[in-house]
């Protein structure tokens, strides 16, 4: 098998995967009678044409990036964390609690304190499924989803009761929300609504890289992910590292919530999590579970999520289309990975290719 | 007090049907060795299609019952189609089932929401299917209310349980399904086409999940909304673990969880001063607690659950 053929084979599979994704998404768009090419243009290109749009894209990329980094750490340790949505909600709650309890602390103290609180909140919520998986063999896929629903209900309960803005009781707009935080927990903004959370995201990407590839803990986490049995024979406590990776993953999701509050909303409202938890799974996979891939991937998905908010007014396509596209992308990625790693299939294609070449010669 | 309890119990059977159908379907999938986490997405699509047909026929007004049953049939067909697609992904291409299931879930929920906004728009209710009082039996005090005055789909769903048991344990096809999920290599050496069996089980299971979704939109809520399914697909998957892959135990699980869910309705309608959110949380907490107690014991689990079958590889 020549090297050129291997590269061509990989390129062809990836190309087929992209075409398949576009065809499936177009089929749904065709069903609702929308212009597919124009919709793709609005979602993927239009947001890049204005500075204002780009900063909105980046705002959405920040939480996606932080969440996806955490999910990639868990995924590499052999756990699929689809509970980032709930972990983020718990991070929001912890952040709000600290921000409302100590409104007058100086900023250099309060802001880190609140961010750490959000990490702890998310971390605990991630540790629960991790430890359940390690000790009681509970499928993390199911427990994290259930914890998502529990966290969402708990979040609205807190918002409606203990965190409710006192003015809200008098004016009563009907949307439960907390008081606006004091400036001591705000993250500064660079331009427009774009805030310094982007620096935090990039620093975290470097940290995750160092943790996973340059430390013993990271090596053990990756070892328990790629071969739990072998890792156990090597004396690695697989359960411990599974729980640890879930706690890290949850802490990242919680921090994403904290950064989102400090930088964008500056008060707790409904709908901050905005499906970022599930999108984070797609971003992590799309970025190849590596920080260097996750940063561009989070930009791309931030683009799609923002572009989809433009779609209803410009082409009459509901914003839910972004969820459809994410589902298709996950399926296409995992399928393409399987085909690419299937050496038997590659062999078969190589033999057929040779036969065709011989006939022509 | 007796009123409340009777009320809760009489809600149990009709409200449990969606969970029951979905988890029996998932049980067929898992018995064949495929872990279908996309159940939630299939239910969402089924719920949308099931609601769309009577809505399109009557515009929200009264329609002939046949349109409702056409809705159920279309939901089952769409479910089977999604099962087929999932089969291509996980059986033919052997993609990891957990993550592919998440993809199917996102696709199904997203597509149902997208299509719903285009074809229906806002919240629209449909007349749904009426309750049938079984003559004589429904007149018995208490028991009549609890067991014998529900809609026809509820009766059919419960009649399906012995049928499912017969299919699974007494027919050649059921044996093939169990073999494909327990020891696919042995099944293969006995001339069973493992992948084909898995495809068939996936299509049957997903068709049931589609029906379950349609039951929610046509018979139970009588409308479609984005939060209609709200995790029932995932609970259905958990119920299969809870029920140790046996139809009767799965049914018991579905009833137990529905009882927890009716608590929320009771809190809402009786005006008991109890935080509504905590009542909604209850079934989800129950799932985690129950899974914590039952997951350690994997003796009854299909041994090849979650493993793609590849006859070209030595194991």
Image (cartoon, coloured by chain):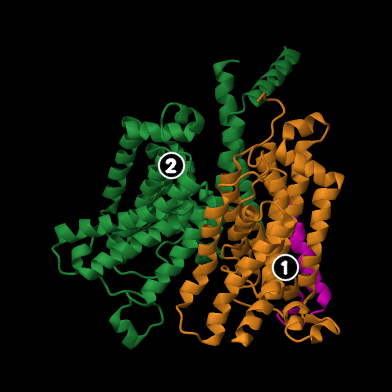
Which SS class for mark 1?
helix
Question: Where A223 sits versus A92, above or below?
Answer: above
Question: Where A26 sits versus B112, above or below?
Answer: above
Q: Is residue A271 magenta?
A: no
Q: Position of residue B46 (x, y in %)?
A: 69, 63
Q: Position of residue A226 (x, y in %)?
A: 48, 32
Q: Which chain is orange?
A: B
**Image quadrant occupied by the C terminus of chain B:** top right
Mark 2: few/some/many CA within 10 Å (<14, 14-19, 20+)? many
Please state which of residues A80 and A170 is positioned toward the viewer in this rendering: A80
Mark 1: few/some/many CA within 10 Å (<14, 14-19, 20+)? many
Please state which of residues A226 and B159 is positioned toward the viewer in this rendering: B159
Q: Position of residue A83 (x, y in %)?
A: 46, 54
Q: Chain of mark 1?
A: B
**Image quadrant occupied by the N terminus of chain B:** bottom right
In magenta, the rendered stretch is B57-81
Labels 1 and 2 within one chain: no
Magenta region, main secondary structure: helix
Q: Please say if the residues under marks 1 and 2 sit with CB atoms less than 8 Å apart.
A: no
Q: Is residue B230 visible?
A: yes
Q: CA distance from mark 1 to mark 2?
A: 41 Å
Indicate the colour of chain A: green
Q: Chain of mark 2?
A: A
Q: Nearer the viewer, mark 1 or mark 2?
A: 2
* Residue beneath disc 2: A242
Q: Position of residue B175 (x, y in %)?
A: 81, 43
| Residue at left offset 45%, top offset 78% | B275
Question: Where B113 sits versus A139, above or below?
Answer: below
Q: Is residue B59 magenta?
A: yes
Disc number for residue B50: 1
């Amino acid at each position: 098998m020549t090297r050129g053929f291997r590269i061509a084979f990989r390129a062809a599979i990836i190309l087929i995967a992209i075409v398949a994704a576009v065809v499936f998404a177009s089929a749904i768009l065709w069903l609702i009678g929308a212009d597919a090419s124009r919709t793709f243009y609005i979602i993927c290109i239009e947001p890049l044409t204005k500075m204002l749009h780009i900063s909105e894209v980046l705002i959405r990329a920040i939480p996606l990036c932080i969440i996806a980094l955490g999910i990639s750490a868990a995924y590499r340790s052999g756990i699929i964390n689809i509970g980032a949505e709930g972990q983020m909600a718990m991070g929001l709650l912890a952040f709000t609690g600290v921000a409302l309890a100590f409104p007058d602390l100086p900023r250099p103290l309060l802001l880190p304190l609140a961010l750490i609180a959000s990490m702890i909140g998310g971390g605990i919520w991630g540790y629960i499924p991790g430890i359940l998986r390690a000790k009681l063999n509970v499928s993390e896929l199911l427990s994290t989803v259930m914890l998502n629903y529990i966290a969402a209900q708990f979040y609205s309960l807190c918002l409606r009761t203990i965190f409710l803005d006192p003015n809200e009781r008098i004016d009563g707009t009907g949307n439960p929300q907390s008081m606006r935080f004091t400036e001591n927990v705000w993250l500064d903004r660079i331009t427009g609504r774009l805030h310094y959370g982007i620096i935090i995201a990039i620093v975290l990407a470097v940290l995750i890289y160092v943790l996973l590839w340059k430390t013993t803990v990271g090596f053990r986490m990756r070892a328990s992910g790629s071969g739990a049995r072998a890792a156990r024979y090597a004396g690695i406590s697989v359960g411990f590292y599974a729980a640890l990776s879930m706690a890290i993953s949850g802490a990242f999701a919680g921090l994403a919530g904290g950064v989102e509050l400090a930088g964008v909303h500056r008060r707790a409202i409904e709908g901050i999590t905005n499906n970022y938890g599930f999108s984070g799974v797609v971003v992590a996979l799309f970025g190849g579970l590596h920080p260097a891939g996750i940063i561009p991937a989070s930009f791309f998905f931030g683009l799609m999520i923002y572009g989809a908010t433009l779609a209803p007014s410009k082409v009459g396509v509901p914003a839910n289309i972004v969820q459809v596209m994410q589902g298709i992308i996950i399926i296409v990625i995992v399928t393409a990975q399987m085909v690419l790693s299937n050496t038997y299939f590659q062999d078969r294609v190589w033999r057929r290719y040779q036969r065709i070449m011989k006939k022509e010669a | 007090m007796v009123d409340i309890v009777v009320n809760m119990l009489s809600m149990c059977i009709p409200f449990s049907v969606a969970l029951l159908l979905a988890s029996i379907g998932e049980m067929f999938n898992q018995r064949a060795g495929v872990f279908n986490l996309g159940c939630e997405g299939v239910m969402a699509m089924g719920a949308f299609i099931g609601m769309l047909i009577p809505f399109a026929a009557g515009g929200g007004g009264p329609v002939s019952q046949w349109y409702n049953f056409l809705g159920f049939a279309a939901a089952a067909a769409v479910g089977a189609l999604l099962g087929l697609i999932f089969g291509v992904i996980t059986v033919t291409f052997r993609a990891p089932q957990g993550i592919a299931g998440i993809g199917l879930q996102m696709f199904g929920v997203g597509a149902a929401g997208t299509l719903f906004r285009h074809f229906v728009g806002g919240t629209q209710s449909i007349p749904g299917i009426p309750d049938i009082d079984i003559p004589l039996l429904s007149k018995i005090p208490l028991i009549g209310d609890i067991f014998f005055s529900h809609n026809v789909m509820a009766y059919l769903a419960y009649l399906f349980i012995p049928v499912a048991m017969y299919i699974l344990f007494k027919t050649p096809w059921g044996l093939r399904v169990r073999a494909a999920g327990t020891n696919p290599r042995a099944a293969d050496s006995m001339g069973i086409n493992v992948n084909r069996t898995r495809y068939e089980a996936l299509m049957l299971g997903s068709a049931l999940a589609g029906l379950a979704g349609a039951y929610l939109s046509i018979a139970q809520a009588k409308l479609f909304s984005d939060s209609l399914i709200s995790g029932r697909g995932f609970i259905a998957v958990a119920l299969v673990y809870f029920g140790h892959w046996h139809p009767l135990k799965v049914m018991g699980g579905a009833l137990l969880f529905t009882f927890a869910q009716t608590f929320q309705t009771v809190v809402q309608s009786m005006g008991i001063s109890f935080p509504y959110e905590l009542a909604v949380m209850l079934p989800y907490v129950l799932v985690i607690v129950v899974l914590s107690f039952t997951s350690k014991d994997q003796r009854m689990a299909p041994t090849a659950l979650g493993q793609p079958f590849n006859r070209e590889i030595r194991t």
